[in-house]
Image (cartoon, rainbow, N blue to C red):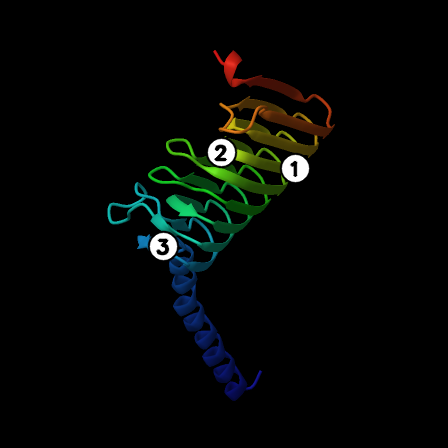
Amino acid sequence: MASGQLKRKMKMNKFILGLSLIMFPFFTYAAATDDNEINIDQVGDTLVLYIDQIGYGNKMGLNNFSSGSSAMPITGSSLTFNIDQIGNENLLYGEVTADSSSYTLEWTGDSNVWDWMIGDSGSSDNSNFLVDITGDSNTMDLDQGTNLSAERLDFDLTVIGDSNVFDVDIDVDDAVWNMDITGGSNNINTMQKDGAEQEINLTLVGSSADVDINQMSGTCPQGISTCNGIITLDIDSENATIQINQKDATNDS
């Protein structure tokens, strides 16, 4: 090899090595700072909230991940939520008090956590939920109307994935709770109570499911003589465990 060519090759190798040393710490640093955090404290009506979070370990409104974060209290009426989290180990935590509100929520990823309390400190009438979850080992913990009165709920949940856990307590008059779940080893624990008209519809496809459904009709409102509770199951599963408790308020123990 000629002397000029050898020198040029050595210079090129030094350039590539130097570029590698500069770029490598950059990518390592980026991977270590994926945790983003959103905290909202909102009071007022007709809020339209759009949030897209993409990445790993993102958080919305959790008060114990870092000392500077807080819960996400949202209060108002005619609220519209459109939240999309894509990634793994993301978290959504909040306390929402809202009438006449709609929620479109979508999660794509694994090991995510959704922990929401709707109507903890005020009424939560006329709620509409459309929730889509795609992924494994996700946890959903939702309570609505547990402390104060709530009326008219339409909740649609669609899940594709395995080993997800759902713990949903609904204390709402006139509630329809639809679940369409595809995947193995999913765990569903739901309570529906204190309603004149209660309806649970579950379509489940997948093996080794664990389903626990409790439905208790409440005291009938004035002018209504019969409080109805309806549970409809469409199950295609092997090794499933299903427990159903259904009773009216007069037989509640």
Task: Give me the residue at 33% from left, 39% from top.
Answer: 121
Residue 180, given in percent of the width and then of the height, sits at 66, 38
Q: Which mark is residue 35?
A: none
**Most foreground residue, 157 or 65:** 157
Report if the CB atoms under discs 3 and 2 are less than 8 Å apart.
no
Q: Earlier in the sequence, mark 1 or mark 3?
A: 3
**Most foreground residue, 164 or 196:** 196
Q: Is residue 2 left or right of residue 48?
A: right
Q: Amino acid at mark 1?
A: Ile
Residue 205 location, quadrant = top right
Task: Give me the residue at 28% from left, 46% from top.
Answer: 66
Q: Which element is circle 3 on?
A: strand
Query: From the viewer's perspective, is the residue at label 3 or at label 2 nearer?
Result: 2
Which residue is label 2 attached to?
172
Which residue is label 1 attached to?
181
Query: From the viewer's perspective, is the residue at label 2 or at label 1 nearer?
Result: 2
Q: In the rendered image of this protein, does residue 145 appear above or below residue 83? A: above
Which residue is label 3 attached to?
38
Residue 39, given in percent of the width and then of the height, sits at 33, 53
Q: Which element is circle 2 on?
A: loop
Q: Residues within 10 Å of mark 2 (few under 14, many from 20)?
A: many
**Most foreground residue, 147 or 191:** 147
Residue 139, given in percent of the width and then of the height, sits at 50, 36
Real-space CA distance between mark 2 and mark 1, rounded to the nearest whole angstrom: 23 Å
Q: Amino acid at mark 3?
A: Ile
Real-space CA distance between mark 1 and mark 3, rounded to the nearest whole angstrom: 29 Å
